Amino acid sequence: MALAGLAVLAGVGPVSEAAPAGAKAPTAATVPPAAVPGPLRTEALGLLSQPSVAPEAAWRRFGPEVVPVLAALAEDTSVPDAQRMRAVTALARVESPEAGQTLQAMLEDPHRPSEVRSQAAAALGQRLGFEAVKTLQARLEDRDLRLREAVAQALGRLGGQRVREVLEERLPLEDVPQVREALQRGLTLAEP
């Protein structure tokens, strides 16, 4: 019984639900909301309740410990949608390699809500700049139409010749009019 209690406190659930040997431990992008430290969660929610995403300096003071908190808040359906989306955007402002990895995991996970993945596309572009082009490019073929639109816009905001080539290459392959329009808008944004 004591082991079950320790497992629950550690955020891994009851011992009977423990992951099999060799399974991956939860990453920052998969930490359940209950495993998030209370005071840090409360402070982050305070910043996320502002009408816009707090500046980088506000998030920097928390350090990398805020990454799993923001990832959990983005998934927590008890948190208002606007705050959840600001949590994803805030990950772009945290000075930590784990922030970029968490955004990439959010973007690439087809089981996450479309709005979280779309917001992660924009935030990843902000966080990594041109380093995000390859990752974003791969999502232009995703089944989620809304995500493909968001990726086209995120790429367009990065600009540059490589981005133009990626968007121009995808345009004739895209069948969905709304995504084609997003690709065109991305091309307009990417113009020198």
Image: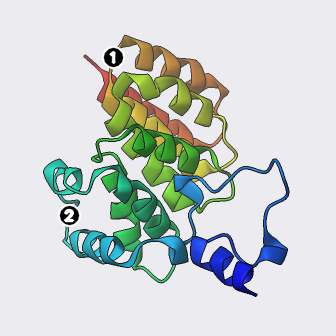
Q: Which mark is residue 160?
A: 1
Residue shown at 34% from the left, 37% from the top: 127
Q: Secondary structure at mark 1?
A: loop
Would residue 84 appear left or right of 40 to someone viewing this image?
right
Residue shown at 25% from the left, 73% from the top: 43
Q: Secondary structure at mark 2?
A: loop
Q: What's the residue type where badge 2 is placed?
A: Ser
Q: How far is disc 2 from disc 1 in space, using C-alphas?
A: 28 Å
Is any part of residue 140 visible from this angle? no
Look at the numbered discs 2 and 1 and tell me whether their residues touch, using CB distance below 8 Å: no
How many residues crowd mark 2 within 10 Å: few (<14), some (14–19), many (20+)?
few
Q: What's the residue type where badge 1 is placed?
A: Gly
Residue 49 x %, y %: 24, 75
Residue shown at 44% from the left, 69% from the top: 73
Q: Earlier in the sequence, mark 2 or mark 1?
A: 2
Residue 151 x %, y %: 49, 39
Residue 70 x %, y %: 40, 62
What's the coloring here? rainbow
Q: Which mark is residue 141?
A: none
Image quarter in which the C terminus is found? top left
Tally of numbered tags: 2
Position above or below: 25 against 139: below
Q: Picture quarter containing residue 9?
A: bottom right
Position above or below: 76 against 67: below
Q: Picture quarter containing residue 13?
A: bottom right
Would residue 56 appear left or right of 76 to someone viewing this image?
left
Is any part of residue 22 visible from this angle? yes
Image quarter in which the N terminus is found? bottom right
Residues 132 and 150: in front is 132
Position above or below: 36 against 174: below
Residue shown at 31% from the left, 76% from the top: 39
Residue underneath mark 2: 52
